[in-house]
Image (cartoon, rainbow, N blue to C red):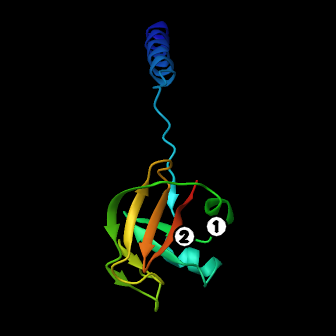
């Protein structure tokens, strides 16, 4: 009887070890989360920003200003202006006027060009990684 219990115990232990050691390989996903308007404006209350496709874009970044970029297709326009709080929605800005045109660039996917009142500004997507 003792040897029978020992035998069953070893089988259970072997099954436990086999299934316990069966580590399933998975994929690791790295995501980059976007920063919201509140975070950007908390860091710099004078930031000139707008939101497009859930991402905040900011201008007046020195290294971005130095880039030579080509305006591509129009992807949107500023529909509302919000200079009173940090609750932003897509195509909303805090300084750009309503009607300002938003363009993609041929060279980079993280920079948009905005054209308004004869002025062209470069905006970088602000993300955290």
What residue sits 49% from the left and 18% below the top?
13
Q: Residue furthest front?
A: 118
Q: Is residue 41 left or right of residue 88?
A: right
Residues tagged 2 and 1 counted as in contact (Cβ below 8 A): yes
Q: Secondary structure at mark 2?
A: strand
Give the alpha-carbon distance from disc 2 to disc 1, as whole Å. Answer: 8 Å
Asked if residue 64 is positioned above or below residue 77 in the image, the reply reads above
Q: Is residue 94 visible?
A: yes
Q: As drawn, is 98 to the left or to the right of 66? A: left
Image mark for residue 58: 2
**Residue 86, image x, y percentages:** 47, 83
Numbered marks: total: 2
SS at mark 1 in the image: loop
Q: Nearer the viewer, residue 21 or 45?
A: 45
Query: Picture coordinates of residue 63 (x, y %)?
Result: 67, 60
Name the residue: 61% across, 84% down.
Answer: 46
Q: Residues within 10 Å of mark 1 (few under 14, many from 20)?
A: few
| Quadrant housing residue 92 | bottom left
Q: Quadrant of the N terminus?
A: top left
Residue nearest the viewer, comparing 108 with 38 = 108
The answer to whether residue 35 of the structure is visible from this angle is: no
Q: Which mark is residue 76?
A: none
Instruction: State the image coordinates of residue 37 (x, y, percent, origin top left).
Output: 50, 75
The image shows residue 45 at horizontal and vertical percentages of 61, 84
Which residue position is annotated with label 1? 61
């Amino acid at each position: 009887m003792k040897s029978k219990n020992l035998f069953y115990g070893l089988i259970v232990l072997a099954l436990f070890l086999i299934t316990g050691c069966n580590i399933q390989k998975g994929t690791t996903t790295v995501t980059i989360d976007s920063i919201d308007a509140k975070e950007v404006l908390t860091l710099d209350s004078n930031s000139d920003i707008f939101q497009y496709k859930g991402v905040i874009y900011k201008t007046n970044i020195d290294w971005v200003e130095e880039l030579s970029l080509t305006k591509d297709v129009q992807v949107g326009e500023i529909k509302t202006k919000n200079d009173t709080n940090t609750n932003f929605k897509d195509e909303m800005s805090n300084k750009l006027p309503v009607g300002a045109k938003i363009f993609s660039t041929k060279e980079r996917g993280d920079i948009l060009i905005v054209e308004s009142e004869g002025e062209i500004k470069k905006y970088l997507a602000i993300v955290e990684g």
